[in-house]
Image (cartoon, helix red, strand yellow):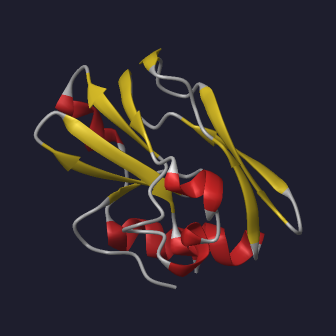
Amino acid sequence: MTAPADLHYTRDHEWVRLQGDIATIGITDHAQEELSDVVFVELPDLGDIDKGSPIAVVESVKAASDIYAPIAGEIIEVNTDLVVDPAKINTDPYDTGWIFKIRVSSPDQVNDLMDAASYTGMVS
């Protein structure tokens, strides 16, 4: 399992990459390993979202898993490549397997999330 040090993590196994006021969100390497082969992704709608709201679904051959908004803001982009190739979440969860982007209402929200060491300790 990998957990890049430059990302923030949730207890629900989502990662957040904050660049300015834009946060890119996906599921962690640990999450995709637990799900196994991802076969479908229900992407969120564009628009405002509250922290903690269920906004997407990742389905695998084993189970379906809700994705929750790790921070509040406005969903401004979704990764439509996942509609055609949802397995990108398995093969490259931290790059091409991202799920959506949020323009965050307050970048300080990431301070409530875990760093890589804390996340790794939680899943070990």
Q: Residue at x 22, y 37 (%)?
A: 22
Left or right: where 38 falls relative to 124: right
Report the residue at 62% width, 65% height from top: 85
Residue 34 occupies quadrant = bottom right
Residue at the far top: name it: 48
Residue 77 image offset from top left, x and y in percent: 38, 35
Q: Quadrant of the C terminus?
A: bottom right
- Image quadrant assignment for residue 43: top right
The number of callouts visible is: 0
Taking the spot 41% from the left edge, 48% from the top edge, the residue there is 25
* Residue beneath the point at 48% across and 69% down: 93
Looking at the image, residue 103 sits to the left or right of residue 40; the answer is left
The location of residue 40, given as percent across then percent down, is 74, 55
Nearer to me, 3 or 59: 59
Q: x, y (%) of residue 110?
A: 28, 41
The correct choice, above or below, for 26 with respect to 123 in the image is above
- 10 w.r.t. 5: above or below: above
Q: Residue furthest bottom?
A: 1
Q: Is residue 35 above or below residue 18?
A: below
Height in image: 8 above or below 71?
Answer: below
4 horizontally vs 10: left or right: left
In this view, which residue lies farthest toward the front?
84
Name the one closer to the observer, 36 or 52: 36
Q: Residue furthest right?
A: 62
